[in-house]
Image (cartoon, helix red, strand yellow):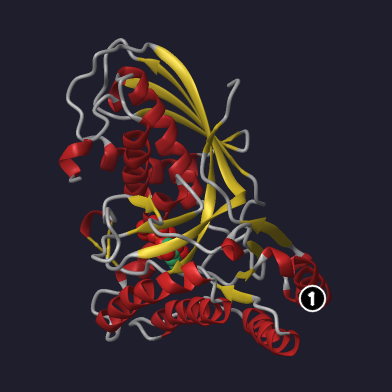
Amino acid sequence: MTEKDFLSSSYPNIKNEGKSVWKAPSNIALIKYWGKRENQIPANPSLSFTLSSCATTTSVEYRRLEKGGADFDFDLFFEGNPMESFRPKIEIFLKRIEMYLPFLKEYHFKIETSNSFPHSSGIASSASGMAALALCLMDLEKELDPGMEADFFNKKASFLARLGSGSASRSIEGDLILWGADQEFPKSSDLYAIKYPFGVHGVFRNYQDTILLVHKGQKQVSSTVGHDLMHNHPFSEQRFVQARRNLSRIRPILSNGDLPAFVQLVESEALTLHAMMMTGSPYFMLMKPNTLEIINKIWEFRQSTDTNVCFTLDAGANVHVLYPENEKDLVLQFIKNELVVYCENGQYICDQIGFGAERVMGS
Ligand code: DP6
């Protein structure tokens, strides 16, 4: 499919008012997206686990205006309160997607959103937030064009979410999601994410992700700026080649359930992401001393117990601790005994692999 397939010109139906509510999950990348071209095209393909508990719920109430204006017309609420500081981000998103949803200026929208995780926990809400909003707007498009197929609905939701935030394209479906075109993966696309198209070993079913909240403050450098620094980065071309190679390497690992190889690849991806931050110009570092304490403890524990616990990181100081479900008791005990002391206010979130966004009924 190309961008043109997502353009809509006229609709068979008219819809004067309505409401749509979606809950979209966060996701954690195993193979990282870091670096992009114009129009949110990723420099390399990325692969993620969709999460389950960490999610954003967004409700969009819409009312058709007598006369469409020159600007977007919307009110924004975050966790029950007006949230003007989100307005510029939403404006940019609506501008980017307007050509694909040409009715946007014909409606007034009341957008209400809330997260399942604590505010400013350092967990990026842009992936789940943009995915939930894209899904609500797709519901309205489906009202205008009821013949739309479910597969197209999901693809276009991912396509639109991507224009809001790249990683959001991976928050529509579950449980293992691939975004970015790669020869070895049929139907993969730079424009939207797809379900991982090959078989996956049972050990990855219900894979666990305990998120250790190391630093809850504002990030020192946004992802947008970080991606931008991959232009003119001395190692970027090598990194993009490596990501593609890792995607190829993870395929047999996922099908055979080779956990030692999985651990090695996933941790290497996380450290490479941060290495890119540390070797750019300007350079920066998002890991905190406690991030490193936790990583070292995980390495010691893995060696001494013969478990397969490992870590990954996103663009921040928090640590995602990944492990198979059959190691849950042992690893949770370890986390409580040895890692919680490194978390801000002792906070952590127990999550696991999830199956994608859900429409909230009865709304
Ligand atoms: C480190 O999706 O937040 O989490 O497209 O600029 O919104 P934008 O960036 P974003 O980048 C996420 C980067 C990452 C890795 C990943 O999720 O693949």
Q: Can I make out residue 212 in this image? A: no
Q: Viewed as shown, does residue 280 lie left or right of 322?
A: left
In the image, residue 226 sits, relative to residue 275, either above or below, namely above
In the image, residue 297 sits, relative to residue 254, either above or below, namely below
| Residue holding disc 1 | 334
Q: Nearer the viewer, residue 173 or 99?
A: 173
Task: Give the quadrant of the C terminus.
Answer: top right
Please report the residue visible at 27 percent of the width from the left and 67 percent of the height from the top.
43
Please report the residue visible at 43 percent of the width from the left and 77 percent of the height from the top.
273
Give amino acid for label 1: Phe
Secondary structure, mark 1, is helix
- Quarter holding residue 97: top left
Q: Viewed as shown, does residue 105 lie left or right of 196?
A: left
Q: Quadrant of ligand 1?
A: bottom left
Q: Which of 179 and 199 is in front in this view?
A: 199
Please report the residue visible at 26 percent of the width from the left and 60 percent of the height from the top.
181
Task: Give the quadrant of the N terminus.
Answer: top left
Q: Viewed as shown, does residue 340 lie left or right of 164?
A: right
Query: Could you tell me how many numbered marks the image carries?
Result: 1
| Circle 1 crowding by C-alpha within 10 Å: few under 14, some 14–19, many from 20 | some
- Quarter holding residue 336: bottom right
Find residue 31 and report its horizontal and vertical position in percent. Answer: 42, 70
Q: Which of 123 and 208 is in front in this view?
A: 208
Find residue 146 and report its horizontal and vertical position in percent. Answer: 33, 19
In the image, residue 205 sits, relative to residue 239, either above or below, namely above
Find residue 270 and report its horizontal and vertical position in percent. Answer: 49, 76
Please report the residue visible at 33 percent of the width from the left and 78 percent of the height from the top.
245
